[in-house]
Image (spheres, grey):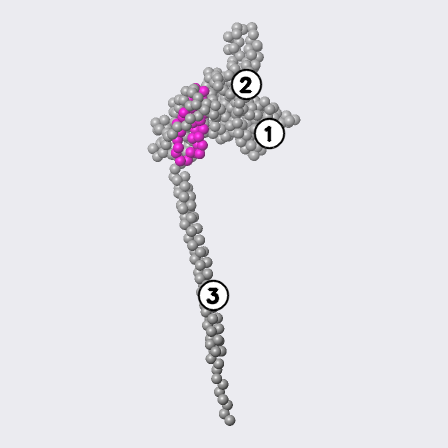
Amino acid sequence: MARTKKKKDPFKLVLVLTILFGVLGAGAIYGSHYIASMRSERLQVMTDEVVAENTQAPLAYEAALAAFEEEQDDGTNEAWPVPSGSGWEIVDLTSYPLESVTTRTIQRQDALYNGMLLVNEWHSRPEDFLEDTLVSVSKATDRTISVKDSSVRLFPDAVEAIKNALLDAKAQNLENYVAYEGYRSWDEQNQLFQKQMEKYKNLSQEEQIERAKKDVNYPGTSEFNTGLTLRLILYKKDDAAVNNLKFFESEQGIWLYNNSWKYGLIFRFPLADYPVKGTADKSYKTGVSVKLQAFRYVGKGNAAAMHAMDLCLEEYLDYLSEHPHIAVFEDGVLRYEIVRENVGNGDPFTVHVTNKNGVRNTVTGLDNMGFAVTVFEY
């Protein structure tokens, strides 16, 4: 008997096909979403990279431009006389006006103690001189500088300069410096002067004064009345070898004499072969012929100029009176531009300053003769 062929159930076939297409559709949809998601993520990564590049590009450009400008614009003017390019040099710019000029108004009290104050036999301390901002050298340096006692005081800029100098000396194993004498008040100077006069009490008062002035400055005319000058000695407890050393015959004294200008300090009273052999006598300008280990704060720019020209303070101010605009170069690179101008005795007063690129700092000091000396540091 022949077998009867079983008929396929059409409903089951439809169901299977429906399920199959559903699975394939779901897979396609999932695959589509997965691909879309991957594409979106990749697109976001690419977008972020482009945004980052676009953000960094201007910054990189600005940095490169700033570096280029700094390299190209060092403050010099191509029309200026060209320095030789070796060592420290002074270029006279008296015939060249200050560039990119503006004005600045300054209070006298903010400029009196910045280093240029001239006090000597012929220039008494100004009447508006104040002691308000003097500081104890010991306290202001956290006792890093040895002092005779707490009475040794100076103005802050002078303290900072001597501190930096002596710390660098210490780094080279040069120690035992002691700040022995700083600021003297008018009363203290007067007491010293009166004591000196008593030695000549058998003379007339006028003669007493003239004889006393040979050894002690008249009150108000001493360098120690400025608060900018410090006298140093060498001392170490129970060490006769150190204590008996003559200051400028020691490594410490010679190092400080040779390097003090780098910190804005000058040796104040050069005499013939003092402090070192070959030193020219400047007593005819300073009015002081006594050997003193006295260092005076004038600021780095002025000290560099004075060092380059081997001038004492009086000679330097005379030089600026004839050459009121100078530039100071180191190995052909502009370091300082210095201008002296008449401002009178008004308070406040106005000076001219430059806004050229490259100027890092500007300091103005009064010289006690009606002039202001402004130093631009590059």
Q: In the image, residue 373 lies at what x, y percent?
A: 43, 25
Numbered label tally = 3
User: Relative to 157, does residue 202 appear above or below in the rendering?
Assistant: above
Q: In the image, residue 274 lies at what x, y percent?
A: 51, 22
Q: Using residue 158 as the reference point, say whether residue 78 is left or right of it.
A: left
Q: In terms of sequence position, does the residue under pointer 1 or pointer 2 come before the other?
A: 1
Amino acid carrying label 1: it is Arg
- Mark 3, other Cα within 10 Å: few <14 / some 14–19 / many ≥20: few
Q: In terms of sequence position, does the residue under pointer 1 or pointer 3 come before the other?
A: 3
Q: Per the image, is 365 magenta?
A: yes
Quarter of image, res 367: top left
* Dot 3 and dot 2 residues touching (CB under 8 Å): no
Q: For residue 143, which numbered disc appears in the image?
A: 1
Residue placed at 43% from the left, 56% from the top? 46
Residue placed at 51% from the left, 16% from the top? 220
Amino acid carrying label 2: it is Ser
- Mark 2, other Cα within 10 Å: few <14 / some 14–19 / many ≥20: some
Main SS class of the magenta portion in the image: strand
Give the residue pinned by disc 2: 185
> Could you tell me which secondary element the residue under label 2 belongs to?
loop
Give the residue pinned by disc 3: 30
Q: In terms of sequence position, does the residue under pointer 3 or pointer 2 come before the other?
A: 3
Q: In the image, residue 342 lies at what x, y percent?
A: 40, 22
Where does the magenta region start and end?
350-378
User: Relative to 159, does residue 206 appear above or below in the rendering?
Assistant: above
